[in-house]
Amino acid sequence: MTPKEVAAEMNGGKPLFMLDVREPAEWVEGHVAGAKHIPLGQLLERLDELDPKQEMIVMCKSGGRSGLACELLSEKGYNVVNMTGGLSAWKDKDKLTRN
């Protein structure tokens, strides 16, 4: 799923569960409003925070780490979709937030 497709679904009001696997410093620089943040290195120890039945859109900066996260989660039975291109390709800047 591309960033453009994710933004279109968000703008259409579709409820999405988004998982951001970037590092904390990247998260603070800006992230999609409403996304859950679990850095890739902590993913396996924090699986209890995720619902394996709920579709998750997994994102990172360019799509590499989120692809790896999707492989790890898929092997554990989670329903995942990689956001290809990552936040580097995100155009809908009004959906990004900082904290």
Image (cartoon, rainbow, N blue to C red):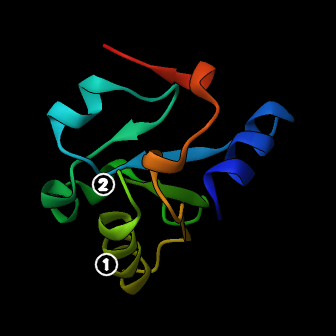
Which secondary structure, mark 2? helix
Q: Earlier in the sequence, mark 1 or mark 2?
A: 2
The image shows residue 18 at horizontal and vertical percentages of 52, 46
The quarter holding residue 73 reads: bottom left
> Is residue 43 placed above or below 94 in the rendered structure?
below
Classify 10 Å Cα crowding around label 2: few (below 14), some (14-19), many (20 and above).
few
Q: Quadrant of the C terminus?
A: top left
Which secondary structure, mark 1? helix
Residue denoted by label 2: 48
Classify 10 Å Cα crowding around label 1: few (below 14), some (14-19), many (20 and above).
some
Task: Tell me what residue is drawn at x 49 percent, y 65 percent.
Answer: 52
The quarter holding residue 12 reads: top right
Marker disc for residue 72: 1
The image shows residue 59 at horizontal and vertical percentages of 44, 54
The quarter holding residue 90 reads: top right
The answer to whether 31 appears left or right of 69 in the picture is: right
Say which of 81 and 47 sits in front: 81
> Is residue 38 placed above or below 33 in the rendered structure?
below
The image shows residue 39 at horizontal and vertical percentages of 21, 49
Task: Tell me what residue is drawn at x 79 percent, y 44 percent.
Answer: 9
